[in-house]
Image (cartoon, helix red, strand yellow):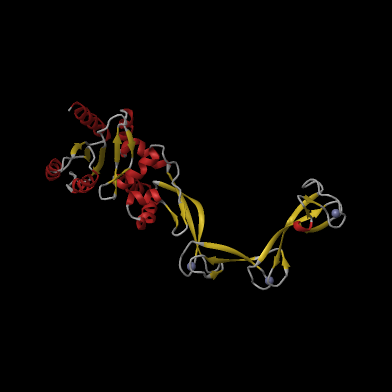
Amino acid sequence: MAKALKSERSKLYKDHLVQVLLSKFLSGELERLEPVFDPDRGYVFPLVEAILGNAGEVEQFLDKLSKAGIFKKELYDKTLFCPNCNSPKISTHYNCPHCGSFNVTKSALIEHLPCGYIDTEDHFTKGDKLFCPRCTKELVKLDVDYKRAGVWCTCNNCDKNFDLPSPSHFCRKCQSNFTFEDAGYENVFSYRLSGDAQKEASLGWILITPIRAFLEDHGFEVQTPGFLMGKSGTSHMFDITAFKKDVTKGMTVIDLATSTDPLVSEQPVIAMFAKIYDVAPDDACLIAIPKISDNGKKMAKLYRISVIEARNQEEAVSALSDYLDEKSSS
Ligand SMILES: [Zn+2]
Ligand SMILES: [Zn+2]
Ligand SMILES: [Zn+2]
């Protein structure tokens, strides 16, 4: 079982989208991936959506990484859904147990300790002070001469009083009323990198982190992933974008392409060309692990994409260093 999971993980580490997400953890930018509440959609993971480019695949993607033992998931919250329209825009009503109305006023109960009188707070209030209606003394200090004695509800419909309301839910989208019995009630998780993944990643299975560190050491501002707006108005994601603040010309975009086959195909070259055609960076570089096909090489030349071939991260970093030296001297 442990072995099967390990091989599953090593397969996933080669997946480029997994690398992009994990680089966020390994760079220290992210310690825990937390959901963000969107009133229309419920809990979402905007970062993961941006990386995958598809909101519909997020849950499955995170599930896959958890099952393989890359992520450890922790219960973060529970969400309620409307049974009628599935909306998470839900409010809670605290209803009168006698007539069912939600037109209920909640008050705080106060007990005056010297005389034992208990009533709702409004009966004690005079201006900004509290006086006992029975013995007329002023209430001085909470938990010394008086204490809070729970809540008291009054139904504005049937005028009955009670201390325990009966809760129900109201869908703010479709206006359905429903109880817990019918509500959708689901787990929401946050995700951390597992101990195994931390160890394995530090063994060098993941590429973006050392490349990022290398570029930062050389004075680049680096984003992983980096998003650049194209002429068309579409935002494009590159695995790495790097630029130097003090240099006007110098936006470099880098994509990684890894293959378990002997050769990386021309596919990542074509995908990258579509993006750089729109974004027009100063330099585009594709790092192919381990090698790229002849066809891929030819196309990259045609599209003015520099190709770096490397068998591992050390080779990738050293080839990138040569590439940047060449750029700065030309
Ligand atoms: Zn009532
Ligand atoms: Zn009193
Ligand atoms: Zn609804």
Q: Vertically, is 323 above or below 275? A: above
Residue appearing at x 50%, y 51% in the figure: 76
Residue 180 relative to residue 228: left or right: right
Residue 257 figure quarter:
top left
Give the quadrant of ligand 1.
bottom right
167 or 40: which is nearer to us? 40
Query: Which residue is farthest top?
Result: 329
Query: Quick one: 253 or 194, which is closer to the camera?
Result: 253
Q: Is residue 106 above or below residue 194?
A: below
Percent position (x, y) of residue 166?
64, 66
Question: Does residue 21 show up?
Answer: yes
Quadrant of res 55: bottom left
Q: Is residue 95 left or right of residue 114?
A: left
Furthest residue in direction front, as rendered? 127
Q: Relative to the observer, which residue lies in front, 143 or 70?
A: 143
On the image, the x and y values in percent for residue 174 come to 48, 69
The C terminus, quarter of image: top left
| Residue nearer the viewer, 111 or 214 | 111
Residue 27 appears at what percent x and percent y? Answer: 38, 37
Q: Residue at 52% of width from left, 62% of height from top?
A: 90
Query: In the figure, 267 relative to 253: above or below?
Result: below
Q: Is residue 68 visible?
A: no
Residue 258 placement (x, y as % from top left): 24, 43
